[in-house]
Amino acid sequence: MATEIPYNRELEFEYGKAAQITPLIRRVIARNPSAFTFHGTGTYIIGTGQVAIVDPGPDLAEHVDALLNALRGETVSHILVTHTHTDHSPAVKAVQEATGAPSYAYGPHGTRPEDGASEGGGDYDFMPDHRVGDGDVVTGKGWSVEALHTPGHCSNHLCFALREEDTLLCGDHVMGWSTSIVSPPDGDMAEYMASLEKVGQFGAGRYIPTHGAPIDDPAPYVKALLAHRHEREDQIMAELAAGPATIAEMVPRMYAAVDPKLYPAAARSVLAHLIHMVEKGRVTADGDVYRLTQD
């Protein structure tokens, strides 16, 4: 029986309005809804008075204005970026122009446009003022976050653990409304699964994703996500047991219950799984045709 992931697709919000999520965290959602962003990008504000902004979001003047309006009378001391997809980091520039705050991130985008497709799109212009590595701690007035490097969805992806509230701001690494897309070349399935194990072992009591509602019981949720990924690989093995096949042939059968509009994104994740399976010696590739490895 397939693992049932306990998604939560309920979310009460109003575009452009700051909502208090926890005593130390507020959220402003950008008006960029899509099949990949759910209702839109959630930009988070940590602290009061002197604050950090996490993922300023897409380059939308309406969103930047709403964010700055929510912070009227306060000082932005840090801009934290989970990763460099175009729904997360492009607004850094406008926020910096308005506030002068420095940016903190793992680094620039890991691939260039000529390297191939990337679901969600890469922000190739972003370069952080300060690079943050795994285990580094960034401290502000009344708050501190520990960075966890969690590649997979994006090679430079960071989660930020807010120590004062046992809360993990998990970007797109874990989302409560959907699984995360893993799209090569910058996305890597082996790294993604290892990063899921990593955050599961870290043990934060609550996850707050960029898209969708908080996850209040994350441990079993992460286990379900891992089980789902292993089951996808079992599906691929079953498909190839029937004979060699291309991704285009497998996706409609594997994702029969999914809107065909999402097949291109599904194909990227299947590709990521197949790359992982080729590396493990379970599958071989001949051009775009895949087959089980013969013992």
Image (spheres, helix red, strand yellow):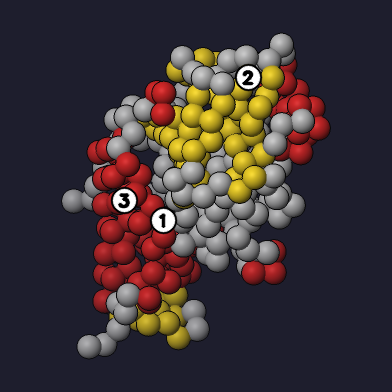
Which one is earlier in the sequence, the residue at label 3 or at label 2?
A: 2
Residue drawn at x 66%, y 27% as measured from the top left: 77
The residues tagged by marks 3 and 2 sit, at their Cα atoms, a distance apart of 34 Å
Which of 139/52 is in front? 139
Amino acid tagged 3: Glu
In the visual, does 30 lie left or right of 19? right
Q: Is residue 266 above or below residue 83?
A: below
Amino acid tagged 1: Tyr
Amino acid tagged 2: Gln
Residue 255 position, x and y percent, is 39, 56
Residue at mark 1: 192
Residue drawn at x 32%, y 41% as measured from the top left: 202
Residue drawn at x 69%, y 69% as measured from the top left: 114
Residue at mark 2: 50
Residue 54 position, x and y percent, is 58, 33
Q: Which structural element holds mark 2? A: strand
Residue 216 position, x and y percent, is 33, 27
Residue 85 position, x and y percent, is 62, 48
Residue drawn at x 47%, y 55% as measured from the top left: 151
- Which numbered marker is on residue 273? none
Q: Nearer the viewer, mark 3 or mark 2?
A: 2
In the visual, does 185 lie left or right of 254? right
Q: Which structural element holds mark 3? A: helix
The residues tagged by marks 1 and 3 sit, at their Cα atoms, a distance apart of 9 Å
Residue at mark 3: 197
Q: Residue furthest right?
A: 97
